[in-house]
Each structure stands twice: as structure tokens, then as C-alpha cells.
Image (cartoon, helix red, strand yellow):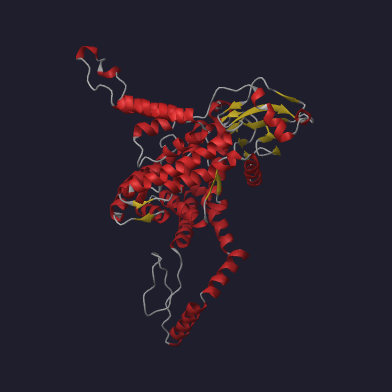
Amino acid sequence: MARTLGDLIGREAAYTFRPRRRPAGDRPPAGDRPDVGERRARSVRQALESLGPFYIKVGQMLATRPDFIPPAMISEFEKLHDQVSPAPFSAFEPVLAQELGPDWRRSFRDIDTAQPLGTASLAQVYRGVLPDGEQVAVKIQRPGVREVMEEDMALLHKVSRFAAKRMPRFNDVIDIEAMLSVVFDAMRPELDFVLEARNMERAREVAQDFEYIAVPRVVNATPRVLVQSLAPGRPIREADRDAFSVRERQDIGRELLAFMYRGYFVDRVFHADPHPGNIFVHPGEKATIIDWGMVGRIDRPMSNSILLLLLNLAMNDGAGTARAWIDMGSCTAWTQAAAFADDMAALVPKIATASLEELDFGVTLTAVLQHSTRRGIRTSPMVSILGKSFANIEGSIRHLCPELSLVDVFSEELSGIVTDLLRESFSAEQVMRTVLEVVAGGAAASQQLRGVARDFANRDLAMRVAMDEGPLAAGRTGFHVGPKEMALALGALAVGRQRRKSG
């Protein structure tokens, strides 16, 4: 690790301090000279790949942050892949013996040890056959990789704290340590396959509600070995569109989006890395989502803010998009909210009517960061992993169904999402929480009740909806309805009405 980092620093230093001018006769034509920024970005990308899975994931996250990563770097970081030369099976056999026991071969009728199904710096995957004849994928963690990644995480934590102290204004809008913590939390199941198996089993339950979505069945899981049912077909990036009917392609694309939307807005647990290599398709079969090692989790307020953001995009509302984005983060002392609203008013109309073929929606969503950071708005650290997930699922579906519109699918799914949220709001747990909040604020509640009684007596009761979540006007009693709940409800009605008219 130290040697690789030293090599990177050495290359960058040699590049930085190289002689700046050469004789005119020795210079290649301008069209033949590689761009300086591109060469540098390529060098950094190659170094990240050589450093291993942790740095690759960080680079992929940075590719969704155009607010502080230059375009050349983003272009290269989007190419980051975790493919390494396969190691011999003999390097992994001790892991199988330690995790499954010395007689591990009895667990399989056969296992193809000559050619792995997949190779990465974290694990290798082999095709196996169970005693009953079922074909499975056997994922085996590379020896020692967990310790290396934990050391990397500790190192980057120190670096992020140092950077925050050196660049306080930058850290006002980009909370480096918090952003890395989100990445670390999402990646931890990749270090323990038992956690990945739990993610998979939960996702498999959710997938049962979908006609065209499947998640592999967990056969066996230990911290370093995961045996799961084999996904049929091939990665979606290799799929032959002509082998599918138009209806099948569109149904698969819609359900992939609907499945992800449910993760973002209802379950609040979502696949954080649904890139084209992690979705398998085959004509006549369900689309199978694999590799549940990297999963994102968000809380209810954050989920509602994202939902409100997409709702405003679907309704072509730039000002509403700006408010929702600010609500996802916070303002700094130098925030320019009005200017940011103007930025969104110019950007949103370009997104609202575009299909996947016309627009890179995930990258466009994260490109809002360029405006928000410039305007002094501190963005939630969850945006990085959400942006990555959005961009990946969009890119995956584009391979099979580029004509699909994410905004249209979102509009179609909105009614169901809002119904689920309303059901949650009136659940027994939520009612109990409301009661406890009332009890905890007993003194204030009693004062409000006395105020309501007084207003009734004076025939001066007013019901108010406070859209800014600020204090109600003095002198009158009012009931407060949060802006997110009201906007989501009204938005669902508006989209539903628009759909009925179009139908």
C-alpha cells in the first residue's frame, strides 16, 4: 500500500515538475498531444484501481461529485472497475476449509475451480453444483483483504480530519469525513458475507411483490464464503435487445426503477451499486439483481426530501426543486438561496421531459451539486451514495430500454409510494410516537388546548398550514402541517389528475 501510494505521488511529482517547454521541432502536432488534464486523470484512476476495492468505491463516489471534481477526473473515475487477474483456486481453498470445514467438498457435487465466474480484488466467484443438482455461485473472500480495507478506512478518516482543518470553508459545504463515513457504512457488508446475505434475504422478500424482479436465494453464508443460487442469463450490459420483445424490455425497465424507488422512499434500504454488471437478464426470465454487499440506508426525513425533490422535477418546478434540495442539507453563512433557485429554474425544464436516451439523469441529479456548492449550500453526505445508485440503475436500464423515461415511471409509481407513506403515518408505532411526543410536551400541549378553548369561546379559531415550518403567527392558535407531507399529498393528487386526463 505504501509503495503504491509512493508510486502515485512520484508520478504526480514527476509530472508536475517536468520541463515545461521543448524545442518547437520536437513537439507533436497539437491534435496528437494528449490533454494534460486527461493524462493526469488517467494516472489517478489507474492508481486507484491498483490500490484495490476500497479506493475504487471512493473513486466511484467522487465521480458523482462534479461540484469539486474536475470533468476530466469524473470521466476517468466513471471507468473505474474492480477487475483483476484471477488468482489460482489454491489461494482460496484454505478459506473454504476454514469457513465450511475440512470436508467442504461434500457440500457440492461439483465446483469449477479452473475458471472463476468473476474476479475482483475483494473476492472471486466460482460456479458450483449442489448435491441435489442446483447450480450455484460460490463467492470466496480473498485472504487478508478485510484487514487491509479496515486499515484503509482508518487512514482515510485521519486524512479527512486533516483536510477539514486545512480547508474550513470547503468543509462548510462538503463534509468530507461525514461523506466517507457514509461510504464506509455502505461497504461494511462487503467485508462480512453474513451481513450481505441478510441484505439479500430482505431484498428477496421485497422482490416477491414484483413480476419481473428476482434476487438470488442464499444457500449458505459465513463471514468469508457466500453460496447463492445462480442468476440466469448474462449481465444487462451484454444483453441483446432484439432477443426481447419491446413489451418485455419496457416491463423489466419499469420494474427495475420501481424496485429501486421502493428502496429509496418506502423501505429506505437500497442497492447502492446496481451497475450493469450486477443485473442479469434473459428472455423469458426475471431480471436478477446480484451483489448485495453495498447497501445504502437513509432515514425518513431524508427519504421524504428526496421524494419531494423528484416530485418537483416531475412537475417541472425549478423553485420547488431548489427548496427540496436545500431541505436535504443546510444553509451556510454565505448561502445564496435566490440565486440557486434561478439556477434550478434554468436546469429543471431540461430534465422533466427527457428519456434515458436523451439524458443522463443520475449524473444530472448530482450535477445540481455544482450549483448548490457554488451557492454555499451544504449538501447531505448521503447525496454521494444516492447519486451513485441513481446513476448506476439508470445506466443499467439504458442498455436494455433507452427510450424509458425515469420521470414518467416515477409519476406512475408515486401514488403507490404516497399510499405506503400514509399507511406508515397511521401505523400503531407512529400513533404511539405521537402520543409520547404529546406527553413529553405536556406543558406546551396544555397551553395550546387552553388557547384553542379560548379561541372557540371568542369564535376566533383559525387553521393554518405553515409551509416554512416556522412559528405560527402570534395571537392565534393553529394546527401545523409539515411542508413535505402537504407537498407530497398535493403532488400525488396533481400527478394522478394529469394521468387521468392523459388516459
Please tell me how many numbered marks the rendered image carries: 0
Q: x, y (%) of residue 459?
A: 43, 85
Q: x, y (%) of residue 182?
A: 49, 46
Q: x, y (%) of residue 188?
A: 56, 42
The answer to whether 36 is drawn above or below residue 206 in the figure is above
Q: Is residue 128 or residue 53 the one in the foreground?
A: 53
Kindly give the residue lying farthest to the left in the view shown: 24
Q: Is residue 338 or residue 79 the one in the foreground?
A: 79
The answer to whether 150 is drawn above or below residue 436 in the figure is above
Q: Is residue 306 or residue 176 the one in the foreground?
A: 176
The answer to whether 343 is drawn above or below residue 442 in the figure is above
Image quadrant where residue 87 sits: top right
Kindly give the residue lying farthest to the top in the view shown: 25
Q: Is residue 316 visible?
A: yes
Q: x, y (%) of residue 271?
A: 55, 42
Question: In this image, 420 relative to 398: left or right?
Answer: right
The structure residue drawn at horizontal position 41% and vertical position 66%, both measured from the top left corner, is 469
Q: Is residue 408 visible?
A: no
